[in-house]
Image (cartoon, helix red, strand yellow):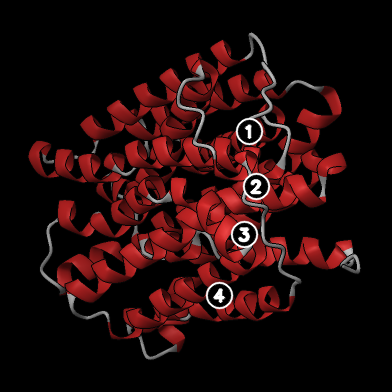
Amino acid sequence: MKPFPRVMLLLALILAAINLRPGITSLAPLIERIAEELALSRSFISLTTALPVLCMGLLAPFAPRLAVRLGLERTIAVCMAVIAVALLSRAVAHASVILIGSAVLLGAAIAVAGPLLSGFIKRHFAGHMGSVVGWYSLSMAIGGAGGAVLTVPAMRWLGDDWSYGLAVWALPALLGLLFWLCLPNRVEADSEEGTSGLPWLKPRAWLISAFFALQAGLFYALATWAVARYQEAGLSLLHSNSLFSVSMLMGLPSSFLLPWLAQRFHNRYLLLVGCGLLSSISLAMITFQPTVLPELWAVTIGFGLGGSFALSLVLPLYEAGSPMAVSRWTAMMLCTGYSLACLTPVLTGLARDLAGSYELPFMVLTTQAGLMTVLAWLLRRGPGRARN
């Protein structure tokens, strides 16, 4: 097979990564309005975030097997198609069943695409994994920030209908689908490497999965409730949305810079500890003093969580030796991590309903960030490179 230009492979990776977050983050600026218009409780509306994350966890283990059957590139193309369909359905999402159904479809597609994109990096960019993961995580951050920042302007441009503001994110998914259909497909050999199970018996895989679960839970809880927390503290909707947008945008530099630094200086675990400490301090301020220098803490929480997510994507690449082995490590990390992380936004919303304010649930989130820091410290004790 004639080699495909590497720049085109990188562009395909970027287009796929951009589509992994807008379907979730685009809901945050509109979640209170949607809950009010559809007469939904906060714990129920948080399912629009929790269900995709749950699906991303439960279905991730199936990704390597689908790649064996269909080929890695074609499987990712199918994921792009499902994301597009899920987001297009939100154009008629004034019924809660459609909104929730689109969330399930979205999570299923992201669940399969995530592990395979890590395997795609291992296959085509083995000598430049740090920089390529930087582009990968930067692209996800761009998609997440775009969903947070551009959804409200898009909604206003489309007649002030929130369903159209959500559905507009199907357009980049359709572009990604067209591009991935052009890539040459490579079916994985039906070998032990491609079909063996996930590394459930490896203690280090559990440490990595637990760290990922904590940082993902924090991200999706904030993606769902940060705007509402700021509003409860007395900030205007415009100011609250701008702070959330700043947090999402600060994921851009950290997503690109930290994986590069990790590869350049071989210090990925110390960087993880730094991200954990920064996230803990920022969340403590958002919890107890949300109106004191809110722009500063919006910047630091975005940088800390964006960096911890990007660095967590790097970890399986250094633990496994082949594309499918990396996909299995990543699948376990995403399966365990997202299955646990999906509970965080739901429990945060439920705690808000029971406690009457966001201070108590945000105290729990701050504790969670501290535990994430401890796990990062434990991970530094040895990379333990595994081959399968």
Q: Is residue 79 left or right of residue 356?
A: right
Lower position in the chain sequence, tag 4 or tag 1: 4
Alpha-carbon span between mark 3 and mark 4: 10 Å
Nearer to us: label 2 or label 4 = 2
Residue type at mark 2: give it. Ser
The residue where tag 3 is placed is: 17
Q: Residue 316 bears which disc, if any?
A: 1
Question: How busy is the neighbourhood of tag 3: few (under 14 within 10 Å), some, or many (20 plus)?
Answer: many
Q: Is residue 169 above or below residue 200?
A: below
The residue where tag 2 is placed is: 118
**Do callouts 3 and 1 mark residues in contact (Cβ within 8 Å)?**
no
Lower position in the chain sequence, tag 3 or tag 4: 3
Q: Is residue 141 left or right of residue 231?
A: right
- Residue 18, quarter of the rendered image: bottom right
The residue where tag 4 is placed is: 173
Residue type at mark 4: give it. Ala
- Asked whether 179 or 200 is in front, the reply is 200
Q: Is residue 219 above or below residue 168?
A: above
Alpha-carbon span between mark 2 and mark 1: 8 Å
Residue 20 position in % (x across, y down): 53, 60
Secondary structure type for disc 4? helix
Question: How busy is the neighbourhood of tag 4: few (under 14 within 10 Å), some, or many (20 plus)?
Answer: many
**Do callouts 2 and 4 mark residues in contact (Cβ within 8 Å)?**
no
Residue 135 position in % (x across, y down): 74, 52
Q: Residue furthest bottom?
A: 159
Q: Is residue 359 left or right of residue 267?
A: left
> Can residue 293 be seen?
no
**Do callouts 2 and 3 mark residues in contact (Cβ within 8 Å)?**
no
Residue 213 position in % (x across, y down): 42, 33
